[in-house]
Amino acid sequence: MRLVLFGPPGAGKGTQSLLLKDRFGLDIISTGNLIRTAIAEETALGNVAKELVHAGQLVPDELVRDLANESMADHMFDRFILDGYPRTTTQATWLQDFLHAYKSPLEAVISLKVSDQVIVDRLSNRRINRVTGESYHLIYHPPPADLDPDLIIRRKDDAPESVLARLETYRRETQPVEEYFRSEGVLVEVSGEGHVDEIFERVLASVERFAELELVSAV
């Protein structure tokens, strides 16, 4: 199974990726984690990324592509979920070409659809333990009562005005990637609103239905 998970900040990609991982035994390939790991392990690509990051520059598309390709090859081109890649139509084209070259095309690109208001609510009420990194929600998953309040922070980019700006950036830069995958016939749209378990059931149903259609088309 080869999947891409899409959605704006706060759509629940991380949660749904973990549920898919547990259900199907998939590995999550996160380009952000790949960059941090490569830097920490001082690999050839990691050293290049380290210099750019320390210089305050963005890691170029080509380096992100190479890290993702290397990781997919390490996974034998199967049983993975891509999170955070591709982010541009150029990256999406690279990904499709790379996987098709190894006869391992994507099975589905799952796009979680969530309204701006729901996302603002989710993120503006999110709190982070600044020591452990654990995430809470003031309404649905509040921090433990015995936890030191000084440990609980709200990220600056989780303020409502910052969230709306991030959503605008997402629509401008990332939504064209969805249109690309729609034209490729692999995009699956799923409502990302409601309880986590309800969303996961929708994701499962969409993936299974999409897989069945692929099998029928191949006959």
Image (cartoon, rainbow, N blue to C red):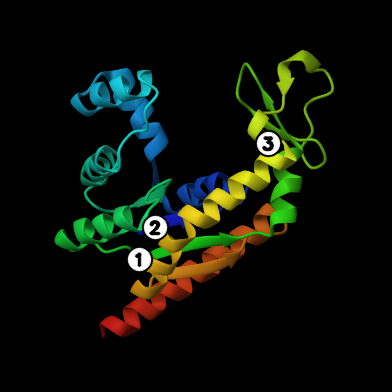
Q: Can residue 16 be seen at all in this image of the molecule?
A: no
Element under disc 1: loop
The residue indicated by pointer 2 is 3
Give the alpha-carbon distance from disc 3 to disc 1, as whole Å: 33 Å
Using the rendered view, name the quadrant where residue 4 is placed.
bottom left
**Quick check: 171 left or right of 101?**
right
* Image point (21%, 49%), residue name: 76
Q: Quadrant of the N terminus?
A: bottom left
- Percent position (x, y) of residue 29? 37, 43
> Residue 186 at what x, y percent from top left?
39, 70
Q: Amino acid at mark 3?
A: Asp
Name the residue type under label 1.
Glu
- Asked which secondary structure carries label 3, the reply is helix
Q: Mark 1 or mark 2: which comes first in sequence?
A: 2
Name the residue beneath numbered marker 3: 158
Q: What is the crowding at mark 1: few (fewer than 14 residues within 10 Å), some, or many (at least 20)?
A: some
Q: Is residue 8 left or right of residue 51?
A: right
Residue bearing mark 1: 107
Quadrant of the drawing holding the C terminus: bottom left
Badge 2: how crowded within 10 Å, few (<14), some, or many (20+)? many
Q: Is there a contact, CB below 8 Å, between mark 1 and mark 2? A: yes
Q: Place residue 103 in its image quadrant.
A: bottom left
Residue at x 40%, y 23% (from the top left corner): 56
